[in-house]
Image (tube, rainbow, N blue to C red):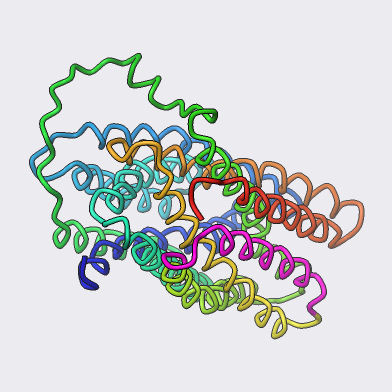
Amino acid sequence: MGLRDLLWLSLYWFGLNFHWGALLGIVIPAEVLRFVPEADKGTALAFIFAAGAAIALVVMPVAGALSDRSGLPVGRRRPFMLAGGVANAAALMLMGGSPTFALFVAAYWLVQFSNNFGGSAYSGLIPDLVPTEQRGAASGWMGLMYMLGTIAGAVAAGQLFERGNRVEVYVLIAAVLLLTLVMTVVRVREERPAARMDRFDLRRFLRGFWIDPRAHPDFAWLFAARLLVLMGFYTVFDFAQFFLKDFMGIERFKEATGIMTAVVIVGAAPATLAGGWLSDRTGRRAIVSGAGVLMALTMLLFLLAPSYALLLGLSVVFGLGFGAFTSVDWALAIDILPSKDAAGKDLGIWGIAATLPQVLAPAIGGPLLDAFNLRQPRLGYIVLMAVGACYLVVGSLLVWRIRGVR
């Protein structure tokens, strides 16, 4: 594939991550502070994130598997992408107009359902279309769009929210999502899928979601490694806005969160392309493992930063590890998929390793934060950083149990 082909293929990752960079880091924590008492913010945020991610746990593999079986003339993946994207934009408008906390939460769960319905099918395009020898490069472009989308979403949302333009944030997220979706769908061409002659069998369909770790041990080890690394990431990322407000004492903490996220991505962006390119030539395990350890060490140093300026410097280093991990971990997953014919389903299952931490990390971290902060102010943030670093180190070590690829 040419450079232009890889760019168009990756563009929708920008829209998806603009969406999540704005929502997870800025919008939802800020809306929680609008709806619930200060003392309950950690638990309330954990409830929203955990329940929403639980929806994604089910939708991702099912939507991926359905797209694997699709025989529509326009392609297997693109119809699912369009349906999910349009529903996603509508659900965002519901979030922005919700007058109560209950309606806001329900609208966010619709966002999770629709986003993962289309996004899971989209993830199958890389193994469908990209030759094996270019998967590292394609994953690097995917990682770059991930970083650029996240930084743009976080900065834009932080600036708008700080100025009181909360409804405009939702409109902007929906517009970017739909624009990048249309551009990718129009420019990417799928081959007309072969007709599916086998009769649909519900039992066989459901059995397909079980990937035997004894038959596919590399896939199982990568799943466990990714789950733990992202447990570490979300244990801290979900509460970053509260960390800046309570631990660092920053007044304009919404805007500061957006800037900090942007700085992380500044460090991550070059690492995504360089890591993906390098992994095609030298192997993937050492890069993934080293990136996780680097993130863990930097996370602990966050607690020692005497100023916001130094915290931003450490965020660049954290970004280097995060960028390398994001791109190379994706390439590693594509290398060891159990079945190329069922790539959408298998990547949906692998994606659970990224979604499950969004359930578990806030469900564990939110109550820990509130409980330890009640004992001693700011103690909860020290506990969260230590727990997150432990997750990252253990996950990084598990990568070395993968034997089938370098």
Q: Quadrant of residue 315?
A: bottom right
Magenta stretch bounds? 279-305
Which residue is found at the position 76% from the left and 73% from the top?
A: 248
Relative to 168, residue 315 above or below: below
Looking at the picture, tell me which residue is in the foreground, 27 or 180.
180
- What secondary structure is the stretch in magenta mostly built from? helix
Q: Quadrant of the N terminus?
A: bottom left
- From the top left corner, tell me how far across and down residue 95 is, in percent: 43, 50
Q: Is residue 189 left or right of residue 245?
A: left
In terms of depth relative to the viewer, which is nearer, 211 or 83?
211
Give percent across and percent down for residue 32.
60, 53
Note whether 281 is above or below 126 in the view shown: below
Magenta includes 348?
no
- Compare residues 58 and 64 and report the one nearer the observer: 64
- Residue 45 in view in this figure: no
Query: Is 289 inside the magenta-drawn segment?
Result: yes
